[in-house]
């Protein structure tokens, strides 16, 4: 097996400035890989899952690029970053500055949105601050300039006897000590200032922390509204306006601190013609930021939502009686609350043995929201004597909210949050900003309204914006930048998203394509970009635009290394590197390196066999028939963009839910179908998406959801602990004679508790180095060298292997090693079946891709006994899978259905769709243009539907397969 372009040629035949040269790469399973890669090209790394693609692309090439960057920093900076390990490679030459665009670094900050992540919102803030027209939030009149005399007249209109002080806001949210300012003000005759809300004398000014932001207002005068103050008030107002550059604050000192009318702000530049008081001092970019106090809604502090106790989560099962624990938050203290409910029952004539559904409406309302008078509770004390006490009856909704607000325990807070749901902030209605900020408009839209539009519509709105005069001159360059960045987002297939969409709600593929669009917008040249499956979550229709975007990034003068399995992307590459031939220990070699035209003929390349048609995923000749009497039907789905959809999911078959990105697949399947089934069958307490009802649940007894969320967020989590197999392996080590002599139990071999673990790294095997402006880096522990355990524990051996040796085995190796144990073999062989044989037992969860994490979960569920009445819901299970791995996965899913279970997959992969028994195609477009069912039926029926984008790509594939 000989590779093309793998370094057999002398170095001088490939000049460094034209090639990226790699020699002797041995990271993870790589076997001394030598490669010469052309620069300024789009290079695709492909091969089986676990063959070593990511080890070469991310753990070798990108890691070395990042290490060299850190090494280039000053010694002062490096002391804070720690020492980064050098990848196991002999030589890398021609390496450009490297940028990684992967799926795992999605922001979970509730303040991050698509707009902030892409920096489009920064430009919008600039646009609105310079070209926005301010309106009064009360009467909607256009705000105009105001004279000092008009301000005086408004102050004099306050009720007679009102005490107030005139303040000049000279510092507004700026860092500094301001000792010179205090001296200057005192020299000008002022005696007092208000610093961060507290009154201070200027003859003894406070010492301020220069690293913190401060508000400083000069107390110009103190007055009482009465006849004869006009001249003095006019002088004071004019003085304040001069000091604060046109701003003045009138503080009514007798009003409570939390009264919104206590402080009235006036501006020479801005005033309502109907004399409504305004609180907007300035029109600066920070005014439109929901992450700063100047613009953020004070009620929700810029989050846009608040938590509210949900009655449906408080009473999840209406068939239960109060005595049986129908009120879930009170079930942990059942006796105490049952006595209170019995007392309430005497008042309102109901019995605690009545199901919740049958209780009178008045009783349910009192239990939920409380009563405003006392109830008499009867109980028996420890001596058996009956006692009565009176108490107010606090409703369960107020009880949960109070306990949530009072607790200092994270565990308790999470427990009470399980009974809550997020609702839009009632003050800003989810817009995140103050009313006066939302009253600033450009082209009849506020900044929040513009951000709520789909990106494609926002781009059209701004492109058609007609600004005149000075506003046009100011906004011209800003609009050019905004439109360019929105265009890049449209090009990577994200036109259906809005700029207000929370970053935490994005899928891995969406987040990666957003970062890709941001990089194009940055216009960097000479960079090495390393991408991890950018086509994830993208419909075939949008693939062409994504590939064109990648090629545009290349044409700017950059080198792209793309780890990818998508056939269209592979065929569009300038250069292909096929890693294999197998996975894990059977991989780690370069099977082929060269132009794409030669891959189909490459000897030993499984990828080449699939591209050439020598191998293919077979389509079943006979599909399972739909049984109309065994279906689960979602009625009236209206979540997100779903338009009152009613659709049936046949049971006992493999169903694929398809459609372009943003068409409503996840809203239908994950938010409604799964959540309703989980609440009814698994006693979950999630809030389903909006719908009328779900029929047919009685045909099922369990629902299993397998998504791509991480199986753990620290190095302590790994496949062995998640699947439960590690408990059985620890018992085997504890049964070794030497362990019994020393008195070691299974707990000795846990790296989560003291005893057997290395205490230097607390059993992690690595130490976390916080990189400040770069992602955190994990380096091996210097005491145990990554083994996780102390020396005494590592002296125990089973079949000549220590517990650390076992953690370092691949799952395939471990399955052979523990073949004598039926329990352990069953666990490990299931992981092998889903294509994870190459993963190491102790591999950190933080290093697993979304697709690998999903397959670990799937294997864990497969180990459990199937009832034949289980429905499995999977979200893009082919993520990260090669053609050959997809073939194996389909075998596992078909096996589940053969046992009588039902499988629902959200999927774009045509091989999976072609193998489904039933297809539900959503669309036709994404966002507002989606949310309807285009067609349901067999793959053949979908392929014959002209209005279905999925059908248009499925038809030629089915035609070729049927011959």
Image (cartoon, rainbow, N blue to C red):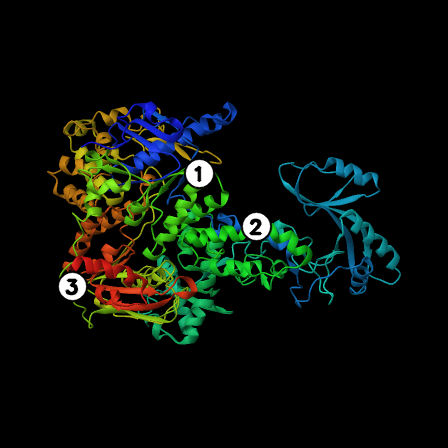
Mark 2, residues whose alpha carbon is within 10 Å: few (<14), some, or many (≥20)? some
The one of 570 and 644 positioned closer to us in this rendering: 570
Return the disc, 2 or 3, that comes first in the chain's sequence.
2
Quadrant containing the N terminus is top left
Return the disc, 1 or 2, that comes first in the chain's sequence.
2
Which mark is on residue 623? 3
| Image depth: mark 3 or mark 1 in front | 1
**Is residue 385 depicted above or below 745 in this figure?**
below
Quadrant containing the C terminus is bottom left
Q: Position of residue 109 (x, y in %)?
A: 46, 48
Q: Which quadrant would residue 783 be assigned to in this image?
A: top left
The one of 61 and 188 positioned closer to us in this rendering: 61
Return the disc, 3 or 1, that comes first in the chain's sequence.
1
The one of 8 and 887 positioned closer to us in this rendering: 8
**Is residue 603 depicted above or below 859 in this figure?**
above
SS type, badge 1: loop
In space, the residues marked 3 and 1 are separated at their CA atoms by 50 Å
Mark 3, residues whose alpha carbon is within 10 Å: few (<14), some, or many (≥20)? some
Q: Position of residue 239 (x, y in %)?
A: 82, 50
Whether residue 867 is visible:
no
SS type, badge 3: loop
- Residue contact between numbered discs 2 and 3, judged by CB atoms under 8 Å: no
In space, the residues marked 1 and 2 are separated at their CA atoms by 26 Å
Residue appearing at x 32%, y 50% in the figure? 708
Which residue, as the protein is rendered here, is positioned at the far left? Answer: 820
Q: Which quadrant would residue 556 be assigned to in this image?
A: top left
In space, the residues marked 2 and 3 are separated at their CA atoms by 53 Å
- Residue contact between numbered discs 3 and 1, judged by CB atoms under 8 Å: no
Q: Position of residue 954 (x, y in %)?
A: 25, 60
Which mark is on residue 123? 2
Residue appearing at x 36%, y 55% in the figure? 542
Whether residue 721 is visible:
yes
């Amino acid at each position: 097996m000989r590779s093309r372009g793998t370094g057999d040629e002398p170095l001088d035949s490939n000049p460094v400035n034209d090639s990226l040269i790699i020699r002797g790469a041995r990271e993870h399973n790589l076997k001394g890989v030598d490669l010469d890669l052309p620069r300024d090209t789009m290079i695709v790394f492909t091969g089986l899952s676990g063959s070593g693609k990511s080890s070469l692309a991310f753990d070798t090439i990108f890691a070395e690029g990042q290490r060299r960057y850190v090494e280039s920093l000053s010694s002062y900076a490096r002391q804070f970053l720690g020492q980064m390990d050098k990848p196991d490679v002999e030589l890398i030459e021609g390496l450009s500055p490297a940028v990684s665009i992967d799926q795992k670094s999605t922001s979970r900050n509730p303040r991050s949105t698509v707009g902030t992540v892409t920096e489009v919102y920064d430009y919008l803030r600039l646009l609105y601050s310079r070209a926005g027209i301010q309106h009064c939030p009360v009467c909607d009149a256009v705000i105009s300039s105001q004279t000092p005399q008009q301000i005086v007249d408004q102050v004099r209109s306050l009720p007679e006897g009102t005490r107030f002080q005139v303040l000049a806001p000279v510092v507004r949210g700026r860092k500094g000590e301001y000792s010179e300012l205090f001296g200057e003000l005192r020299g000008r005759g002022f005696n007092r200032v208000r610093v961060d809300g507290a009154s201070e004398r200027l003859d003894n000014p406070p010492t301020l922390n220069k690293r913190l932001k401060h508000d400083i207002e000069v107390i110009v005068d103190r007055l009482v509204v009465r006849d004869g103050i006009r001249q003095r008030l006019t002088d004071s107002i004019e003085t304040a306006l001069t000091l604060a550059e046109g701003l003045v604050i009138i503080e009514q000192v007798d009003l409570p601190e939390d009264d919104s009318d206590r402080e009235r702000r006036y501006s020479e530049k801005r005033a309502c013609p109907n004399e409504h008081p305004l609180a907007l001092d300035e029109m600066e970019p920070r005014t439109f930021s929901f992450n700063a106090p100047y613009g953020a809604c004070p009620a929700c502090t810029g989050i846009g939502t608040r938590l509210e106790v949900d009655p449906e989560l408080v009473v999840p099962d209406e068939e239960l009686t109060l005595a049986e624990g129908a009120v879930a938050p009170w079930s942990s203290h059942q006796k105490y609350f049952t006595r209170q409910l019995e007392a309430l029952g005497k008042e309102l004539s109901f019995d605690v043995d009545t199901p919740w559904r049958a209780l009178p409406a008045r009783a349910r309302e009192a239990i939920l929201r409380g009563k405003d008078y006392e109830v008499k509770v009867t109980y028996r004390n420890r001596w058996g004597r009956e006692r009565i006490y009176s108490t107010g009856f606090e409703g369960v909704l107020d009880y949960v909210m109070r306990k949530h607000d009072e607790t200092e325990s994270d565990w308790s807070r999470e427990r009470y949050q399980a009974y809550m749901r997020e609702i839009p902030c009632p003050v800003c209605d989810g817009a995140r900003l103050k009313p006066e900020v939302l009253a600033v408009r450009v082209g009849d839209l506020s900044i929040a309204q513009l951000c709520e539009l789909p990106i494609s519509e926002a781009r059209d709105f701004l492109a058609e914006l007609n600004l005149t005069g000075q506003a046009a001159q100011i906004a011209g360059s800003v609009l050019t930048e905004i439109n360019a960045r929105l265009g890049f987002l449209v090009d990577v297939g994200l036109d259906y998203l809005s700029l207000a969409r929370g970053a935490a709600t994005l899928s891995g593929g969406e987040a990666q394509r957003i970062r890709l669009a941001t990089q194009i917008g940055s216009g960097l040249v000479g960079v090495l970009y390393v991408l991890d499956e950018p086509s994830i979550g993208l419909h075939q229709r949008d693939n062409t635009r994504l590939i064109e975007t990648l090629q545009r990034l290349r044409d700017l003068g950059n080198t792209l290394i793309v780890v990818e399995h998508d056939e269209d992307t592979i065929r569009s590459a300038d250069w292909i590197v096929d890693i294999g031939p197998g996975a894990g220990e059977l991989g780690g070699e370069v099977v082929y390196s060269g132009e794409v035209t030669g891959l189909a003929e490459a000897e030993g390349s499984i990828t080449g066999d699939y591209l050439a048609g020598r191998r293919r995923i077979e389509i079943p000749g006979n599909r399972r028939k739909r049984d109309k009497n065994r279906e689960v039907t979602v009625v009236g789905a209206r979540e997100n963009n779903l338009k009152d959809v009613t659709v049936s999911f046949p049971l006992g078959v493999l169903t694929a839910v398809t459609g372009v990105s943003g068409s409503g697949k996840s809203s239908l399947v994950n938010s409604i179908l799964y959540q309703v089934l989980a609440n009814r069958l698994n006693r979950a307490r999630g809030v389903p998406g909006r719908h009328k009802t779900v029929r047919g649940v009685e045909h099922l007894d369990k629902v299993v959801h397998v998504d791509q969320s991480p199986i753990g967020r620290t190095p302590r989590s790994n496949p062995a602990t998640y699947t439960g197999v590690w408990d059985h392996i620890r018992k085997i080590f504890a049964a070794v004679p030497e362990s019994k002599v020393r008195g070691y139990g299974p707990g000795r071999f846990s790296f989560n508790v003291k005893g057997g673990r290395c205490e230097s790294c607390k059993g992690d095997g690595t130490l976390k180095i916080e990189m400040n402006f770069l992602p955190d880096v994990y380096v091996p522990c210097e005491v145990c060298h990554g083994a996780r355990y102390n020396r005494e524990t590592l002296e125990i051996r089973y079949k000549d292997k220590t517990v650390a040796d076992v953690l370092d085995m691949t799952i395939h190796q471990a399955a052979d090693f523990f073949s004598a144990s039926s329990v352990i073999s069953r666990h490990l062989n299931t992981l092998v079946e889903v294509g994870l044989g190459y993963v190491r037992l102790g591999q950190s969860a933080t290093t697993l891709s979304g697709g690998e994490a999903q397959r670990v979960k799937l294997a864990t569920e497969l180990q459990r006994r199937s009832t034949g009445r289980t429905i499995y819901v999977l979200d893009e299970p082919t993520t990260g899978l090669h053609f050959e791995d997809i073939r194996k996965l389909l075998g596992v899913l078909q096996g589940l259905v053969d046992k009588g279970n039902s499988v629902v997959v959200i999927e774009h992969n045509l091989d999976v769709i072609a193998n489904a028994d039933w297809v539900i195609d959503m669309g036709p477009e994404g966002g507002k243009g989606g949310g309807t069912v285009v067609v349901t039926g067999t793959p053949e029926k979908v392929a014959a539907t002209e209005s279905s984008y999925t059908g248009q790509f499925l038809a030629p594939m089915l035609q070729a397969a049927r011959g």
